[in-house]
């Protein structure tokens, strides 16, 4: 079962491999993209193409995870989709153990800015989850326990404490003054 | 006044004036789409028993034995509540009518009530050439040749006029449909109405009939040479037909994983539905034993 939002209708991509390449060109392009994704684990390209290829890559990995390498039809499918045959080993020996207990999709997609000047295409980035590359959006380093931050935090707490004390004293002073005011007004 | 009433009724609602309060009454038996949509999204519509059915695992071939319980894979036609209600209706029908297991290629006899037939009943015997539809709308087509005339009747499986379905010979064929029998020699689809039932021991594997059908010479209903059909003899066509078939062939569809995924109910969903069906069928069998 696919664990990401896929389109209910496929994109026909009529000129995937040049004008008029048709459905055969589309599937050929998809095979190249799936092979590249399994090889490099992170690829960049036009959004519609990668979005289509994502479904095929997910289904291929899902079949491999479900059926394993002893299942003949699965091996035939993998042989069709992976143009470079050394990737068959990678699929069954690296990716299947990686995604055996996955509860999310196997791939992830990111939007990239349109390149200008250029074709004006909506660009995207497609990657396998848990890949060895650095994160697309880098995780911020934990700086909470740096010495300077610890000192600043302590100083801030100190300052707040002092401020509360002075406020308390001031409020006591004003309370007394209001009390005296009321007594004087009542006396005449 | 009546004209006004009609005009308001045409809009789907009637407004009654009672002590200066407008009460809107629906006269029709339909609900507004917005109400249905609200109910679909409501938490009450989520099935609380779902966790129980998950644990029940149906045998692997259940989706081939009861294909009519699988919903239409087109997402725009799916509605979980309607599917559930239809399943309830189907099980209720199964309590009064025994709907046997059969496949394309099996020989069936169907008894339907017919007000114009003598005895008000009509029995038709034929070979099942197709099964289609989903849920309550599932159908099967029987074909026979009567007095040299090819006859086909499409029955709805859950039609209340059906009084009985009898499987005379339980077997499968090499293809998912047998529409090519329309262009075949009549002996391949001629079945006598007094066909003796062939016993099938329960639990035995369904035999596959490997017969190869010989077609009449062209013209045909379809270009059978362009379809990947196993149950056909050599078509004896000129070479140009096969060349054209090779040109328009789509060999990649066999590997188009997303196309297959979009056009079928995926394994997880099917297992869930079939677990529920398995439970219900077992309950039905228990009540019949009593």
Image: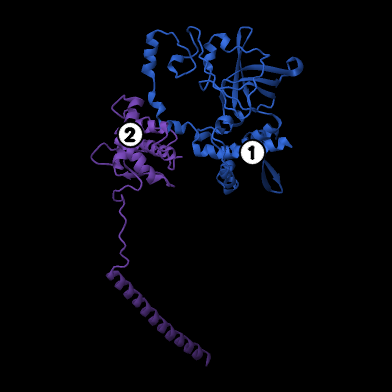
Chain colours: A purple, B blue
Q: Nearer the viewer, residue A117 or B257?
A: B257
Q: CA distance from mark 2 to mark 1?
A: 43 Å
Q: Nearer the viewer, residue A106 or A181?
A: A106
Report crowding for label 1: few under 14, some 14 to 19, many 20 or more residues within 10 A (C-alpha). some
Q: Measured from the top left, where is residue A146 in percent x and y?
A: 29, 68
Q: Is residue B165 above or below residue A62?
A: above
Instruction: Farthest residue to the left: give it.
Output: A117
Q: Quadrant of the N terminus of chain B?
A: top right
Q: Measured from the top left, where is residue A135 in percent x and y?
A: 31, 51
Quarter of the image for residue B195 reads top right
The number of discs equals 2
Chain of the residue where label 2 is placed in the rendered structure: A
For the residues bearing labels 2 and 1, Cβ distance under 8 angstroms: no
Q: Is residue A127 above or below residue B151?
A: below
Q: Measured from the top left, where is residue A28 in percent x and y?
A: 32, 29
Residue B286 in view: yes
From the viewer's perspective, is B70 left or right of B2?
Answer: left
| SS at badge 1 | helix
Q: Which residue is mark 2?
A: A82
Q: Residue at x 54, y 22 (%)?
A: B208
| SS at badge 2 | loop
Chain of the residue where label 1 is placed in the rendered structure: B
Q: Do dots 2 and 1 share one subunit?
A: no
Report crowding for label 2: few under 14, some 14 to 19, many 20 or more residues within 10 A (C-alpha). many
Q: Is residue B243 above or below residue B263?
A: above
Q: Which residue is mark 1?
A: B280
Residue B45 in view: no
Q: Measured from the top left, where is residue B163 in percent x and y?
A: 71, 24
Q: Quadrant of the C terminus of chain B?
A: top right
Quarter of the image for residue A141 reads bottom left
């Amino acid at each position: 079962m696919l664990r990401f939002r896929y389109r209910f209708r496929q994109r026909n991509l009529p000129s995937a491999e040049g004008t008029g390449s048709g459905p055969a060109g589309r599937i050929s392009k998809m095979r190249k993209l799936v092979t590249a994704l399994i090889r490099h684990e992170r690829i960049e390209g036009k959004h519609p193409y990668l979005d289509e290829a994502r479904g095929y890559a997910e289904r291929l990995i899902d079949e491999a995870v479900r059926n394993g390498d002893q299942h003949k039809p699965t091996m035939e499918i993998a042989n069709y989709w992976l143009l470079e045959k050394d990737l068959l080993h990678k699929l069954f020996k690296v990716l299947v153990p990686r995604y055996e207990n996955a509860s999310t999709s196997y791939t992830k997609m990111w939007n990239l800015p349109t390149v200008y000047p250029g074709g004006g295409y909506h660009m995207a980035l497609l990657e396998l989850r848990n890949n060895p590359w650095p994160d697309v959006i880098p995780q911020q380093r934990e700086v909470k326990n740096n010495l300077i931050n610890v000192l600043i935090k302590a100083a801030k707490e100190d300052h707040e404490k002092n401020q509360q004390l002075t406020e308390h004293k001031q409020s006591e002073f004003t309370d007394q003054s209001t009390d005296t005011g009321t007594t004087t007004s009542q006396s005449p | 006044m009546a004209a006004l009433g009609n005009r308001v009724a045409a809009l789907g609602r009637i407004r009654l004036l009672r002590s200066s309060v407008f009460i809107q009454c629906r006269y029709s038996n339909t609900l507004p789409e917005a109400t249905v949509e609200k109910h679909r999204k409501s938490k009450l519509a989520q099935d609380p028993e779902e966790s129980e059915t998950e644990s029940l695992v149906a045998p692997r071939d259940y989706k081939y034995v009861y294909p009519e319980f699988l919903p239409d894979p087109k997402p725009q036609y799916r509605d979980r509540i309607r599917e559930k209600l239809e399943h309830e209706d189907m099980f209720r029908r199964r309590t009064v009518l025994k709907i046997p297991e059969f496949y394309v290629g099996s020989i069936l006899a169907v008894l339907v009530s017919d007000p114009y037939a003598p005895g008000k009943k009509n029995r038709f015997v034929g070979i099942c050439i197709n099964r289609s539809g989903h849920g309550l709308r599932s159908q099967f087509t029987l074909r026979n040749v009567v007095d040299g005339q090819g006859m086909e009747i499409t029955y709805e499986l859950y039609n209340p006029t059906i009084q009985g379905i009898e499987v005379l010979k339980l077997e499968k064929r090499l293809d998912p449909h047998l529409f090519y029998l329309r262009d075949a020699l009549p002996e391949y689809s001629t079945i006598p109405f007094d066909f003796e039932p062939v016993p099938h021991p329960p639990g035995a594997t369904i035999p596959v009939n490997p017969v190869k059908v010989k077609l009449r010479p062209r013209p045909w209903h379809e270009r059978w040479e362009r379809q990947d059909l196993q149950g056909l003899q050599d078509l004896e066509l000129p070479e140009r037909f096969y060349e054209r078939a090779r040109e328009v062939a789509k060999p990649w569809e066999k590997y188009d994983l997303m196309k297959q995924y979009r056009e079928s109910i995926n394994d997880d969903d099917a297992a869930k539905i079939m677990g529920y069906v398995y439970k219900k069928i077992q309950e039905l069998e228990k009540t019949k034993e009593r």
